[in-house]
Amino acid sequence: MSYLPCVEIEPSESANAAVIWLHGLGASGHDFAPLVPQLTLPSELAVRFVLPHAPSIPVTVNGGYVMPAWYDIYAMTTLREVDTDRLRQSAHEVGKLIEREIERGIDSRRIVLAGFSQGGAVVYHAALTQTRPLGGLLVLSSYLATADTMERDPVNQSLPVLIQHGVQDPVVPEILGQQAADQLRAWQYPVQYQRYPVEHGVCPQQIPVISRWLGECLTRAYE
């Protein structure tokens, strides 16, 4: 079976948990690698970080320029006109990475999906349609692009979800993050929504919060 190419950061001991983290438009799996050493996780956790690279495709809103992208964006409207078929295909590829972690001996409940911007839209779809119970869903500066078409699986109805968004984000306006949180609450998922004084990126204040949240999600799987 073929998989997305990935940056993989292994723990010092044999991995007993995994975080699959998707980058944003025009970036790569290396984008969030520098953040991993900054995370402080419980000592009993040995987390493998899997940071896949998106394929390079033409992106309409950037004049058809070929760049790493999880899907095409047709228009940067408030509703975000995107290639949902390609988005679903990217989510399918994430599902294959989940299965690979399970084959490596990781319990699916000890796998967290994370994504920034475009990557966040993909992991929303991947997590909520996943037939395996997961450990958590982290979404940064993103939006829910497939709310009207996704077939959610009840196995992750109680999935912990943490959404963080910059209040000054000019690329993905915060209203899109808030709308995603509202939709998930309407679907009765346990959602935390947090706002930060940042544009389209991650600020230092977010790191300890993400660390604690990941620790809680992955430790809970022991119980």
Image (cartoon, grey):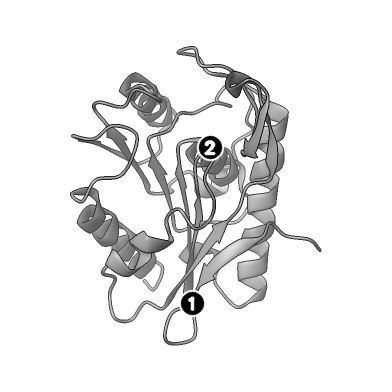
Residue 135 occupies which quadrant of the picture?
Answer: bottom left
9 and 93: which is toward the camera: 9
Q: Which mark is residue 25?
A: 2
Residue 198, percent across and down? 23, 35
Percent x, y for residue 151? 64, 33
Amino acid carrying label 2: it is Leu
Q: Disc 2 or 1, which lies upstream in sequence?
A: 1
Residue type marked 1:
Glu
- Judge whether 50 appears above or below 188 on screen: below
Is residue 165 depicted above or below 145 in this figure?
Answer: below
In the rendered image, which residue does mark 1 sit on? Answer: 10
Residue 10 against residue 145 in the figure, above or below = below
* Residue found at x 62% / y 70%: 102
* Residue 39 visible, this orientation: no
| Comparing labels 2 and 1, the label whose residue is closer to the camera | 2
Is residue 52 in sight in this rendering? yes
Q: 165 or 162: nearer the eye?
A: 165
Count of marks placed on residues? 2
User: What residue appears at the point 49 percent right and 86 percent down from the top-left corner?
Assistant: 14
User: Looking at the rendering, in which quadrant would you find the C terminus?
Assistant: bottom left
Secondary structure under tag 1 reads loop
Kindly give the residue lying farthest to the bottom in the view shown. 13
